[in-house]
Amino acid sequence: MTTEAPDHWVLTLSCPDRPGIVHAVAGVLAANGGNITESQQFGDAGTGLFFMRVQVESAATEADLESALTEVATEFSMTWSLDRVGRPVRTVVMVSTAAHCLNDLLFREREGRLPIQVVAVVSNHTELAPMAQFYGVPFHHIPVTRDTKPAAERALLDLVDELDAELVVMARYMQILSDDLCRALDGRIINIHHSFLPSFKGARPYAQAHDRGVKLIGATAHYATASLDEGPIIEQDVERVTHADDAGELVAIGQDVERRVLARAVRWHAEHRVLIDGHRTVVFR
């Protein structure tokens, strides 16, 4: 006699902090035959909010789990989500002309090292169309000018809806998004940028940094919001450099940091390890 293997679920939640939350959640999961395989929680004393991520194996149906969790969520005023562990998140990657982040994401996806399914590459240029073709991903050219920007953003949102995309990644997409677009994709659009902001803005930031003799360069991955480059930070990293590194070497080092930081941020988001806490994030690693 064989027994059907249980499904593996990931539950994330946030709510006002009060006694009994962990006990209530664990009790609901246990009542539905759940075996907790991973559990992390955090109480933010500053905001008074409680955050939790649980992985659980259970033979209960998704409908039964959701019904039981709805009851406890109502009791504790929770915002919550339930998903299967490892389910690939449908993702649109946006690029301009820099290839390093796109190549890294597509390679990691192909190797099974990122739980995402890249359903489209969108660009305001055409240089990276061959790379998308190499990986077998549909490429969409949506040019952007000052006059066409509203139409271009509508086309992007239409594509996201058409493809049922859950995540949008700005993999060195060199366009400023409108407030409306950021609101439409709130909490599901990730951006990556170098660490020189706000000191070295505009063109050739690495050359500017080299000219000023910087000793640390790095990258920041964050959720895109209406406040340019000020959304909740998911991940950051740095590399030490010296006077001997020329501007070209700084670019290469910076690109390496950018791709690593972005890959970690995308993976943690896709694994439901990132919960937004106002202007900050809680990242359960």
Image (cartoon, rainbow, N blue to C red):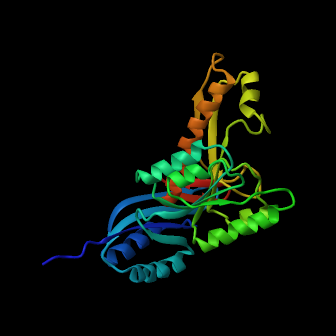
Q: Give whichever of 151, 22 is nearer the camera.
A: 151
* Percent coordinates x, y for residue 125 in the rendering: 71, 51
Q: Give whichever of 165, 50 is nearer the camera.
A: 165
* Percent coordinates x, y for residue 94 in the rendering: 64, 55
Please identify the quarter of the rendering in which residue 55 is found. bottom left
Drawn side of residue 252 relative to residue 31, left or right:
right
Using the image, determine if residue 104 lies above or below residue 199.
below
Please identify the quarter of the rendering in which residue 150 is found. bottom right
**Residue at the spot x=54%, y=46% of the render?**
103
**Residue at the spot x=77%, y=39% of the render?**
198
* Percent coordinates x, y for residue 128 in the rendering: 62, 49
Drawn side of residue 80 relative to residue 202, left or right:
left
Q: How many marks?
A: 0
Drawn side of residue 59 relative to residue 63, left or right:
left
Using the image, determine if residue 67 lies above or below residue 210.
below
**Residue at the spot x=72%, y=35% of the render?**
196
- Is residue 184 visible in the rendered structure shown here? no
Q: Give whichever of 277, 176 is nearer the camera.
A: 176
